[in-house]
Image (tube, helix red, strand yellow):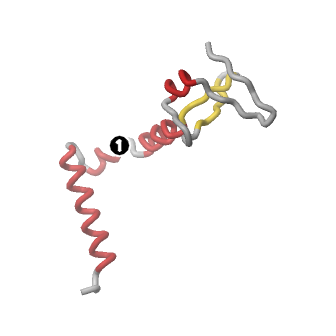
Amino acid sequence: MEVAKITSRGQVTIPIEIRKKLGVKEGDKIIFLEEAGRIVVVNSAKVAFANMRAAFAGEAERLGLKTEEDVVALVDEVRDEMWKERYAGND
């Protein structure tokens, strides 16, 4: 169990062991969630990544991407299209 003290400004220093478990460092952001009547502290980057993963669920299959090479080829294709759009007519 770790204990932290609240300052007069409402600030708390998160103990080092908790920071390590959360995977946070100076400048990172954390989120306070209420779950089943308890307050839970989570790493905001991990929450954002989980939300992004959920939003993209099924997209690889929909696009027919089966391998890493398929993904690289799609990225190359999109970059090529963007390059052409941006620099078309700038000869």
Crowd tier of the residue under label 1, counting other residues whose Cα lies within 10 Å: few below 14, some 14–19, many 20 or above = few
Q: Give the quadrant of residue 57.
A: top left
Task: Tell me the residue at 69%/22% (across/down).
Answer: 4
Task: Tell me the residue at 42%/41% (across/down).
Answer: 53
Quarter of the rendering occupied by the C terminus: bottom left
Which amino acid type is marked by label 1?
Gly
**Coordinates of residue 31 in the picture (x, y in percent):** 61, 36
Residue behind mark 1: 58
Left or right, residue 30 beside residue 8:
left
**Coordinates of residue 87 in the picture (x, y in percent):** 30, 79
Mark 1 element type: loop
| Most foreground residue, 19 or 67 | 19
Q: Give the quadrant of residue 5.
A: top right
Task: Tell me the residue at 20%/49% (across/down).
Answer: 70
**Coordinates of residue 44 in the picture (x, y in percent):** 54, 38
Q: Give the quadrant of residue 75.
A: bottom left
**Coordinates of residue 12 in the picture (x, y in percent):** 69, 30
Question: Which residue is outermost to the top?
Answer: 1
